[in-house]
Amino acid sequence: MQTDETPKFQSSLKNNCDNCTAQSLHLWPHQKQLLFQNVSPALEAAPRLLMPEDHTLKKRRRVFSNPEIAREFALHLLYFAVFAVAVLGLLHWHGLIQLFQEESCKDGDLQIQSPRWKLSYFTTNSSDIYPLHKRFVRSTIPRKDKQEKSLLTIYQRMTEVKEILLQCESLVKVTNYVLREALGKTLFFPLPTCDQRLNNQITKVDPLILVRVKIKPQLLYQVLHFLKELDLLVDAHLAKAFYIVKKLMVIKQEMILGKTSKTNNEHVLKWLKRNRTHRKSFKVDCPDEAPYLLPWNPGHHENKKVKIGRGMFLKLESSASLHSIIIENGGKLVFNDAPKSPITLKARYILIRNGGELHIGAEKCPYISSATITLYGKSTDALNVEHFGQKFIGVDKGGVLELHGRKTLSWTFLAQTLYPGGLQSGAYRFDRYWGSRGINIRVIDPGTAKVLAAHRFDTHLWADESRRLQEFLRRQPRGRIVAIAVGDSAARRLTLSARNDLRELLGSKEAMYLGYRQPWAAIGVLGELFAMEDKQLYQPNGSTGMAVVRRDFQTYDGIHFTVTAFSEWVRGVPHCGFRVDVSNGVILNLMDDASSWLPGDQIVIASTDYSMHQAEEFDLLPCPGCNIYQIKIGKPRYLHMGEIVDGIDMRAEVGLLSRNILIKGEMEDSCYGQNFCHFFSYDTFGGQIKILRNFASVHLSGVELTNMGQQILGSYPVHLHLAGDVDRKGGYNPPTYVDNLSIHHCFSRCVAIHGTNGLLVKDTIGYDTLGHCFFLEDGVEQRNILYHNLGLLTKPGTILPSDRNEIMCISIRNQVCGNYIPIPSNDCMAVTTFWISNPNNHLINNAAAGAQDVGIWYIFHRNPTGESVGQFPDGQPEFTPLGIFYNNRVHSNFKAGLFIDSGVKTTKCNDNDPREILALDFARFRPHQNADPRQPRVPAVIDGLIAFKNNEHGAWARGGDIIFRNSGFSDNGIGLTLASDGTFPTDEGSSMEVTRSVFVGESINVGYNGGQNRYWGKGAYGEYRTLPRNRTFPIRGFQIYDGPVRLKQCTFKKYLSNHERHSSALGFFMRNPWQISPQNNISQVKLESSANLEVFFGTPGQWFGTNSLDGDQTSIFHDLDGSVTGFPDTFVVRADNYLVRHPGCLSVPRWNGVICTGKYAQLYVQAWHPENPSLLIAKDLYPNHPLKLQGVNRRAPYQQYQPVVMLEQAYTLSWNGSTPEQIVLYPINFNRGDWIQVGLCYPRGTVFKVMSDINQRTSGRVHSVKQYKAASSLSILQKNPSKSLYFFDIDSGILFIILQAKQTRKGHSYCSKHGCERVRILAHINAWETSSCLQTGYSNKDTSVLGHLTSLTGRVAASCSQCGAPQVAITSDPHTTYIRIQIQSQSRRDLQNGHEFAFIKVNDDVLLFEKPGLFVITVDACSGEILGRQHFDAVQTLPMADSIANYIQAIIPERSITLVCSRGDYAWPLNRMSSAFLRIGASKPIKFFTEGSFAMLGFKGQLKPAWIKIISHSVGQLAASLQQYVPLKLHEYGCPGKLKENRKDLKLFQDLISPF
């Protein structure tokens, strides 16, 4: 170990003695070498400072001044030294000796301990890597004051202060038993009898060894105290040992009493299970327990540079501040896991290299205490370490970094919806000064805490207000909460009758005596005879005390809330108000065991709305009454869903931000220097962890990182930089991993995987970070596994163009060429939570819960970039098959949840392309076997995607082939858009598919108006809700761009248009200049009744523009089975597309479309010289309705058009301008024998050369060339369609050709395997004149040979049992089975309005109720089977109430889901019966309202699930209804038999990490 100071050698070893002197320190020669090797020459003299002045120095000099005597003495000394070193070396080699720290002393600034050799407890396994390092420590230090006395004396003194239950002899026997079991027979030293004295040579024992002995905790506790009094325990681990034993005693007591209270003992039990092994097989798993470690306490010296080198094995025992630490050449630094206080190590940097090691805990022995590493420094400091920069923990070649914090649950989901303020209706707050005169009243529902009515009665000024007050109170149902607060004054016109009503209805005593301007507040329950109230006397000075009343209540689902009313005068101003708040925090119900989360920990709850900024942070509050699935927090501001909504899992993610190992950057108060302060007001120069190639071992788990990352390329919180293969393929066993990290409030990414393959990133949270979060950098990264990670609140950064927002994009121009100004939407604005630059990576169970742009983006590098240039051939990532994508969720992102499209620019800017390198660019995903486009395609499977509340797209995918299945889309601007990987002729004919999926337009997740949500307006059902994009944005479920795409076995629900916007299940890409394939097909879809607009083709306006681009006009899809239109084998097209419609089509005006029969394909037209004319094409049946196509010229030397045509029909093509000299016609999507007749307009004197060939696009080879001959008439041409003929009608100026396919086409390929058939027309035009033959030429056309046009027949009448998604719900736990419950009650008002039925629906089973009364349905919570149904007639009174109570208590079996529904008026006394509902989940007795309605989802069992719901409405409210998705076969239910989960996610994960 070195420092940067030369005068003195600073050792940080702790001084354990108080009276030692400098003369008592002596070092063996090899010990000096151990301590001072590899030090600089300036430090080699430091050991001289250790040697004290000897008082016999002169005498020794005189003796050794004789040369002969000196030589003889030196020779003998040498012989002795050689013999001693040989013997000690042999013992050392066999692990029989070790260093022990006995005394220490101080000499100036030097602190060092004097070790002496001592026998080890155990011999180590010969297979250990470090045999000397696997030893325990024991001491031979005698304590005369205790060891000279008999055991009985010590025992008697101990019993005076400790609760010792055993007699002395018994205690000795038990102690000997424990020592023998812990140490074994060979090293066991028995204690003497009680009347004997202790042998001074008995050595000290590590108490942690004794704790591992299996014995009753109470006995072990007494043994430890006994040995402590005998001074036979090593002091270093005493506190930890007693802590463990005390925890064991608590656990034992709870087991005896049968308690299940939440404790923090799990880590204790795991520690014992890990360490209670037999002595012979015991190994040191905890790095800080290694006996060779020397205590290190360097103190606080921020100018000192420390090197820990060869032979230095240090255990940091206390906080320290240093300039820097370099660990190298086999040196090791370990954090003590039992410090007196939490350890904080502060340094500018820590560099680990060449065999150096830094350990905090281990994989099998997680660190239990608290440890912090603080990295400090400013970007303006003149300090920059090569390859690492500043403010870092760096791992270079040969370095070892092992950080393992306490094992905790990383993140989970809410199991119950969290409402703003913690109450379903939200917290209520009302404050008023002037304008509140009289009695202010709030009526509150006791079951839900909702404020139902708010009124003011000016009983000071108006006499009639007292009557109104009385009428209002008498109309309220009994049981309602009433809160009263006087504003200004209320007594002057308050009648005696009104005062009496307040007394009789609310139990008020003060109302009778309310005086002028007296502040009065009261809270009561109508029908009770007691009210809480407070009243103050009015003071002439205009100020009074506050009359305030608070009263606590509880909702039916167990939430405690407080109602507050207050009234006062403040300096002549009246003030009154009300509050309805949760009481003492909000209890969250979670999906997983959160007992590892402790009070004081910090969590984050993700947004479940369009704005990612609704994510909220909370500190956990103490909650003694919480079970293992519950935690307590403060009041939330926003709505966070905790349930499955309309079949889509919208449960909010809840992540733990706190870890007991913390690495953080020390930050300045504000931005400074060149840190982009014009974008960020805060300091963004944080710390970083950087890992380079050829490191020895890196494993990070249970670590919190905050204030990390820098807005500098390559400086990220966790960065594996060009590390290559870091799994077993690279020789790492165990493979490298990043597990259970919390990376939050950081300034550049989360985990950067750069030129690294095979990394496991698991259970890691990235929250509130800048730039791409989980980031694969150069496009070469493969085989990385991202498993169960959570990223949220991903904000823009400055490093790459794709990181930047609009302002950053335009402002940062230092890497563009010339005067180019970046276009934000094209070059930038792509910040993403999971940025995947190579498809060969695996994503399982991840959540992207809010990014400025995209949740998960598969981006494609046509060439590797950065320092990975040249590693792959051009375009390889675009052809690479997709890795596993399973059960991932994306929500609350602005641009898209999932995006599969585009690439990045891989070249630097130049004059031809001035854009910055790595700006967004064109790319297409076309996966093939072995990434070889010559081999077959490999479908990319997106399995189990959940996308909701994304502003624009739930998912966008372009390429082929890509298959979406088992996915759910809800509340997105557009659910899913599928686009092909290009256009003909560059696209070979791939396809896209979505199957077994659910689409929801506007769910019951209405969101919350706040947290940067942009739009708030009326939903389809009249409710107010947050909206995507804009209040008028046309919502679409599945959007077709070009195709071909397939949609089958999908369900659509809740697509309802209103006066502001259209909302359709199926739609088309807006303002689409591209082609659309007639191969787009739909089958087996289920359009629920709530999807009232099935298809929409758009109309001109704000969003669709003129709706006249080529793709807009040619939109089409094929309804294979009639599940959309009701007519099988029909095509749905736009109403004004007369190229495909015919007289037999059926018009659907609300779609702006028609339904047609027939056979359809595409005609691909290339026009050369000139390149940009527009094309007019008309079907001969409708010459007055030509279609005008603009074409798509993507920097090609020709213009291209691709209209959809009806086969066996005739078409005429004309040009808006000069006729092209060369035209190429491709019949695409034509099967063998399919044909159309084409007429092309030319000037009359044109000379033609017409030929056909087959173009093999992949090879570029052209074959089967044929010259066309002129036919003498059109009829000859039509009679010989297979011959190579053309006919030019000179009179009309029309060239006629029949295009007929002669090759067989397969699948979705545009052409046959032999290539694409085409006809090339070369025209020599003598006169440059326009030719418009659409009108003049039709009299010469013969239409007798055209195909027969058919009308619609065979409408589908029966429902399709196989249509729709088969799943009940699309969830993030697909291994769990759910049932869908819907309960709809009816009140008396519903019956009067003609609503006849109440019902309960279990999945698709509907149980209707026609009789008045209560209905109870029981469902088995393990199987989902309906067990029974019971009706209780409202005509009966008390006997029926008893029957209901008895039915719940005695008849309903355990583990039953209980569904209760009311119909009509049940105005019968239910007070006795209402308490029975406590048995099925109610938190308090139910209050039933006369003429009201009631619905309940309960559970009879040993627990109270979070999904229980209770609604009891009074007259005037809507009938009680609820819907819920309820899980079956949960372990907590106690279902009989062994529950076996089909965990596909775990199987996939195990297969990926398995070495075989």
Image: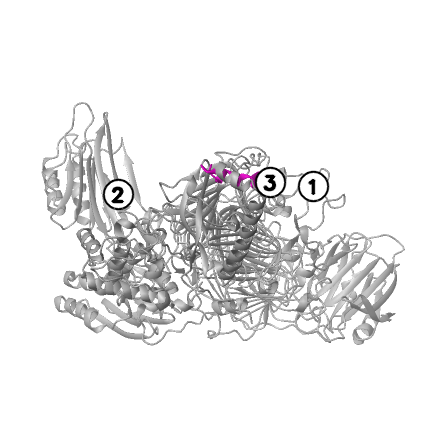
Foreground mark, 1 or 3?
3
User: Which quadrant holds residue 1387?
Assistant: bottom left
Task: Indicate the position of residue 146 as horizontal and vertical percent values.
Answer: 26, 51
Q: Are marks 1 and 3 in contact (CB under 8 Å)?
A: no
Q: Earlier in the sequence, mark 1 or mark 2?
A: 2
Q: How far apart, in angstroms, are the residues tagged by discs 1 and 3? A: 52 Å
Magenta span? 41-56
Element carrying mark 2? strand
Q: Secondary structure at mark 1?
A: loop
Q: Is residue 529 left or right of residue 444?
A: left
In the image, is residue 50 part of the stretch drawn in magenta?
Answer: yes
Q: Position of residue 647 (x, y in %)?
A: 42, 63
Label placed on residue 454: 2
- For residue 438, above or below residue 1422: above
The reply to whether residue 435 is in sight is: yes
Determine the CA span between mark 1 and mark 2. 62 Å
Q: Nearer the viewer, mark 2 or mark 3?
A: 3
**Residue at figure coordinates x 46%, y 64% from the top left:** 124
Q: Is residue 1337 left or right of residue 184?
A: right
Q: Nearer the viewer, mark 1 or mark 2?
A: 1
Which residue is tagged 3?
Answer: 41
Find out whether residue 1318 is within the magenta segment: no
Q: Closest to the observer: 898 or 1119?
A: 898
- State which tag comes first along the sequence, 1 or 3: 3
Residue type at mark 3 is Pro
Q: Check disc 1 and report the residue beneath it.
A: 816
